[in-house]
């Protein structure tokens, strides 16, 4: 399903929603057939680095440069409508406005799918979904759901494909006190690869993930394969492992992925993060990096290389609102498109340090 | 001010303070996690998993978000405050993998819903417990 199919899906969902069947008013019955919700972030970023633009999302072609404040990298607004047709069948549409690969805030459909619950542990979705390539990638736009201003950009460097149009199978297996959430996603995506001009090359994508949850601990393993017949012909494989332990009063989280690609070479990205919760305040720190592991046919030796140290605090100052203040130092380890930057200028040098200050207001409704 | 009147005032004041303390004590007092009479037993870990969206083996029923019993329940059973719980459910909601537990206006409504559904789990003040439901866990 491509963009063109989306309005048709929307119309059929609305039509189905209005033709809802009568249901008993017991506790199990969902008594509302359409629910609306939304999220957003108002953010400003400042950078002291003049030789490149700091970006918040790998697809952004421009960001914030020297001594400038910008609201573009982090600000977004999303709206979601959830349609419940029967106990087993539902649909969702989520529209997002965020600085995109064209440098515009043009609203785009991020989720549009029909979901069918086959058993209590098995469900299938057909339509558009955000790719679950790394931890929290599918809620990367919902600032309120994240402990930080944004997901460390290094981990997302090779995953410029955003959503996939296709099939998603979710299966839950319980073994004693361990629950495994298995997910298989198969579809087509538009992929913007790092290091090349932003083209929208259609690619076939398969993602398989297994999240093992044991009380407050979870381990997430993921494998993703992109195949694109565009130029250059691309096969990009991403294998990742992430770990979270969050008992409530504090948290630690780590994620990593290894990307393999003949043209661009292999890349290894990872981060570790920790934080504590002191009443309404939750200070945190992150170390994140990406480093090239081999040279591909492109000849690029150090694609994406940089590393970042981040410190920040989340303040839950009101119901459904938070504000975050984040300071980071990024060290440029390569002039071959360092992950955190776009528009690298001739004056940039390996070893340059950039200081980025971000202030955001997140909300959900 | 005549001493008697002053004495009266301070007595009223102490009584009010005592009453307020007593009320606060009841509110922050014991919570009973309740299930249907026909239901099997459920552990504290299973209850936490349900209310944090990690399991859908049962149907959790919530009190009003931000109410004293809501805050106390999440703090004691899941170790999390209202904002953390909201962040967790936002992640689930915006990936369309579930919806937060249905909220009911008071303990009487929760009790009634649990009594009517063998899969339901709820929480109420311990003083509200009667023989229409059974207590799965007492939270102090």
Image (cartoon, helix red, strand yellow):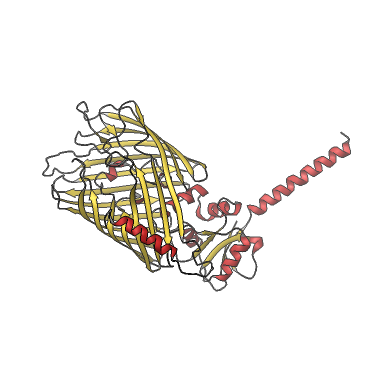
Give x and y (percent) for residue B105. Answer: 60, 58
What residue is at 49 percent from the left and 46 percent from the top?
Answer: A320
Give x and y (percent) for residue B19. Answer: 73, 49
Quadrant housing residue B2: top right
- Residue B81 visible in the shown view: no
Q: Is residue B86 above or below residue A19?
A: above
Direction from residue A126 to residue A26 in the image, left or right: right
Direction from residue A103 to residue A30 in the image, left or right: right
Quadrant containing the C terminus of chain B in the rendered view: bottom right
Q: Nearer the viewer, residue A175 or A13?
A: A13
What residue is at 60 percent from the left and 54 percent from the top?
Answer: B69
Direction from residue A186 to residue A136 in the image, left or right: right
- Residue A129 visible in the shown view: yes
Quadrant containing the N terminus of chain B in the rendered view: top right
Q: Nearer the viewer, residue A289 or A116?
A: A116
Q: Which of A109 and A26 is in front in this view?
A: A109
Q: In this view, does A306 lie above or below B19?
A: above
Quadrant housing residue A176: bottom left
Give x and y (percent) for residue B50. Answer: 47, 60
């Amino acid at each position: 399903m491509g963009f063109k199919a989306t309005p048709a899906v929307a119309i059929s969902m609305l039509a189905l929603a209005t033709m809802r069947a009568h249901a008993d008013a017991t506790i199990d019955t969902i008594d509302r057939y359409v629910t609306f919700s939304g999220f957003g972030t108002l953010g400003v970023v400042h950078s002291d680095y003049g030789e490149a633009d700091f970006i918040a999302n790998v697809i952004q072609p421009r960001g914030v440069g020297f001594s400038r404040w910008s609201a573009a990298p982090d600000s977004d607004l999303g709206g979601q409508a959830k349609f419940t047709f029967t106990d087993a069948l539902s649909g969702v549409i989520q529209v997002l406005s965020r600085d995109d690969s064209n440098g515009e805030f043009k609203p785009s459909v991020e989720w549009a799918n029909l979901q069918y619950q086959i058993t209590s542990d098995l469900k299938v979705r057909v339509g558009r979904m955000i790719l679950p390539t790394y931890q929290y990638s599918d809620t990367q736009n919902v600032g309120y759901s994240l402990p930080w201003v944004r997901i460390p950009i290094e981990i997302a460097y090779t995953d410029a494909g955003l959503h996939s149009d296709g099939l998603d199978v979710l299966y839950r297996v319980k073994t004693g006190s361990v629950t495994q959430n298995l997910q298989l996603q198969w579809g087509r995506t538009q992929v913007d690869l790092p290091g090349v001009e932003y083209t929208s090359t259609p690619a076939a994508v398969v993602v398989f993930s297994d999240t093992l949850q044991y009380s407050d601990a979870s381990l997430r393993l993921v494998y993703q394969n992109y195949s694109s017949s565009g130029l250059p012909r691309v096969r990009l494989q991403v294998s990742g492992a992430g770990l979270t332990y969050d008992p409530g009063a504090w948290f630690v989280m780590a994620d990593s992925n290894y990307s393999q690609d003949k043209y661009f070479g292999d890349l290894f990205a990872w981060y570790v993060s920790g934080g504590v919760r002191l009443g309404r305040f939750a200070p945190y720190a992150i170390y994140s990096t990406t480093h090239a592991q081999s040279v591909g046919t492109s000849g690029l030796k150090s694609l994406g290389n940089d590393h970042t140290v981040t410190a920040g605090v989340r303040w839950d100052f009101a119901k459904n609102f938070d504000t975050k203040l984040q300071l980071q130092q990024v060290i440029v380890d390569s002039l071959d498109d360092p992950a955190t930057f776009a528009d690298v200028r001739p004056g940039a040098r390996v070893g340059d340090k950039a200081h980025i200050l971000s202030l955001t207001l997140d909300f959900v409704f | 001010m005549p001493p008697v009147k002053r004495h009266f005032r301070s007595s009223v004041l102490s009584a009010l303070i005592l009453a307020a303390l007593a009320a606060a004590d009841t509110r922050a007092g014991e919570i009973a996690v309740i299930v249907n009479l026909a239901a099997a037993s459920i552990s504290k870990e299973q209850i936490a998993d349900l209310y944090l969206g990690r399991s859908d083996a049962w149907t959790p029923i919530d009190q009003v978000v931000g109410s004293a019993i809501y805050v106390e329940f999440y703090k004691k059973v899941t170790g999390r405050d209202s904002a953390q719980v909201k962040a967790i459910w936002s992640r689930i909601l915006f990936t369309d993998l579930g919806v937060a537990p249905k909220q009911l206006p008071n303990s009487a409504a929760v009790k009634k819903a649990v009594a009517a559904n063998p899969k339901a789990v709820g929480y109420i003040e311990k003083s509200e417990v009667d023989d229409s439901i059974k207590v799965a866990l007492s939270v102090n």
